[in-house]
Structures are given as C-alpha cells and as structure tokens.
C-alpha cells in the first residue's frame, strides 16, 4: 500500500476486511528492530460501498480513543493514492485467538485460568463503554492471547455511543448484516440499534463458552434459541463458581428488558475470590469450643 508499506502475507479475513502482515519501510530505514505492522483494508465487496473509506476511518477513530492494555493499539490511517482504497495500520499481534483456546479445552477452562481471562475481557469492554465506544462484534475470533496478555481487536462494526463519536459514519445494519449471528443479541437480529446491552450479550456468550467449552445455545442464534425455549434449560457450567452464575445468566437473556446485568456487575462477581466451605464433621455436631476456665 503506497510507498511506505510492503505487504508480506495475509493474516486473516473477516466479514468486512482483510488483515496483512506488512513492513513499515520508514521504520526499517531508521533501524527500528521491529518494523512490522498489521495492515487492514476492506475486502472487495465492502470496498465498493460508497462510504467504505469513511467506515474504515470510523474504526480507526473509535480505536484511537481507547487506551487500554487489553485493546489493540492503532497506528495510522491512509488512503492509497493509486487505488483510492483506505487502509489502517495497527500493532502486529501474534498468538492464538479464543476460539483456538476453546477448541483445545472442550470441557471449559479451569477457574484459575478462566478468572483472569474473564476479568481482562470485562475490563476492556468497561473501558470502551466508558469512552463512549461500542464494539459491535465481540466473539472468540476477535480476542487474541499474545505475550501472556489479552487483546480485543476489530472495531469495524463498532460505533460511537455519545458526544462527538456519535457523528462518525455508521454501518447500515439493515443493508449489511455483517455481524456474527450466534453472538448477536435478539434486538440486533430484529434490526435494532447497537447498545451496551448488545455488547454485554455477546461477551456473556463468550464467557459461557470459555467456562463450558461450548456456546450457551449450541451456536443457535438468539431468535432460534428463543423459539426452542433454550434459555429456561440453561445450566451453569461446571467450572463456573456458583456466585457468578446469576449475573451471567441474566446477561444471556434474549429480551433486553430481562438482561438486567451490567458489565460492572459481572466484573464485580468474577473478581470475587472463591469462598471455600468445608462441612462440619458429624462427629463434632454436639461439641462446643473449649474454653479455658480460671483456676
């Protein structure tokens, strides 16, 4: 792209864009030992959209307003002079995505591994919402574990939720249903707007999947699962502590009015230490603590 970046190989293709490993020739010229970046551009279908470049800039603008260790760091936005196709550059990530972690743990992650991962996901989403940014497409393939850390990426379906950010270009969800259906809240499937509650539903699906090894509704969409009354038979994952289940279950509710949990509530309950309880032995049921008597 342009004269500054040299594409080396394709890293991945999503619903809207493609991401490449590229070498930044300016960094290389000045002796940077790590001149590589991730370069993202829209795929051929979306690049023909009349607002394609503006939509990609919207992703760059949203991500640039987030400063969190668990969210991908953007570098720059460009429009190629020859093709007039926009692209952005970001930090180059390397590591497995959560879908690979889930596939390797079909019984779910043990709590010691699940808790720090869940807290990182909740922290990054809470930060984004506090900054007025909605992600729009939270799913296991959009979270990577790299250098023993977590990174949420791909805000291509996101939007600003307040203030100046709300003026950025938005994707028409009625024209282009690009989100992943099994992580989309019911109101999105019905043509409703993106909101903190829709991000919450998607993240709750991911947390359940990490704890159990499978999607809470067997990878059905929310509409399909509601028709089959899947919510009433939803069971607590074995690896999830009991005190986390009520809040997570409410976050998985199909109807927005019943989705009464919040990211901060989930963060609070997932952050609580386990309370270990050992039953009092039967032989000691009639015993009283010994007291020293005065001589």
Image (spheres, rainbow, N blue to C red):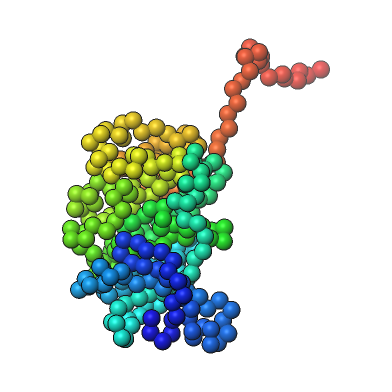
Q: Residue at horizontal 58%, vertical 85%?
A: 31
Query: Is residue 137 among what the camera can see?
Result: yes
Query: Is residue 250 among what the camera can see?
Result: no
Up the image or down, 130 lies above or below 19; here it is: above
Where residue 4 appears, x then y in whole percent? 43, 85
Q: Residue at horizontal 44%, vertical 57%?
A: 143
In which quadrant of the rendered image does the N terminus lie? Answer: bottom left
Question: What residue occupies the far front of the structure in this picture?
Answer: 9
Where residue 236 appears, x then y in whole percent? 42, 34
Up the image or down, 114 lies above or below 280; here it is: below
Left or right of residue 191: residue 40: right
Q: In front: 295, or 216?
A: 216
- Number of numbered discs: 0
Q: In front: 51, or 264?
A: 51
Up the image or down, 126 lies above or below 89; here it is: above
In which quadrant of the rendered image does the C terminus lie? Answer: top right
Question: What residue occupies the far right of the structure in this picture?
Answer: 295
Left or right of residue 276: residue 92: left
Q: In front: 37, or 172?
A: 37
Where residue 92 appears, x then y in whole percent? 48, 69
Q: In front: 237, or 228?
A: 228
Q: Residue at horizontal 47%, vertical 56%?
A: 97
Q: Residue at horizontal 65%, vertical 15%?
A: 284
Picture quadrant where residue 256 is located: top left
């Amino acid at each position: 792209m342009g004269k500054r970046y040299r594409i080396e190989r394709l890293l991945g293709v999503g619903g809207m864009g493609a991401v490449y490993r590229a070498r930044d020739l300016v960094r290389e010229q000045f002796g940077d030992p790590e001149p590589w970046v991730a370069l993202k551009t829209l795929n051929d279908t979306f690049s023909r959209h009349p607002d394609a470049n503006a939509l990609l800039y919207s992703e760059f603008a949203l991500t640039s307003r987030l400063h969190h260790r668990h969210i991908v760091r953007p570098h720059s936005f460009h429009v190629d002079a020859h093709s007039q196709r926009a692209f952005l550059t970001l930090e180059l990530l390397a590591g497995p995505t959560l879908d690979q972690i889930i596939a390797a743990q079909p019984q779910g992650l043990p709590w010691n591994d699940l808790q720090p991962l869940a807290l990182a996901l909740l922290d990054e989403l809470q930060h984004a919402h506090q900054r007025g940014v909605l992600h729009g497409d939270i799913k296991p393939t959009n979270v990577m574990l790299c250098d023993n850390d977590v990174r949420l990426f791909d805000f291509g379906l996101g939007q600003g939720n307040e203030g100046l950010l709300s003026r950025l270009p938005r994707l028409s969800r009625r024209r282009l249903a690009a989100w992943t259906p099994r992580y989309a809240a019911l109101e999105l499937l019905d043509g409703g707007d993106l909101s903190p509650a829709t991000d919450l539903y998607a993240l709750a699906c991911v947390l359940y999947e990490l704890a159990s090894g499978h999607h809470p509704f067997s990878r059905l969409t929310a509409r399909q699962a509601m028709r089959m009354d899947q919510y009433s038979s939803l069971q607590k994952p074995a690896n999830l502590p009991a005190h986390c289940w009520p809040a997570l279950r409410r976050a998985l509710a199909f109807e927005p009015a019943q989705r009464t949990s919040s990211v901060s509530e989930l963060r609070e309950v997932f952050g609580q230490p386990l309370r270990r309880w050992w039953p009092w032995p039967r032989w000691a049921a009639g015993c009283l603590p010994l007291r020293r008597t005065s001589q």
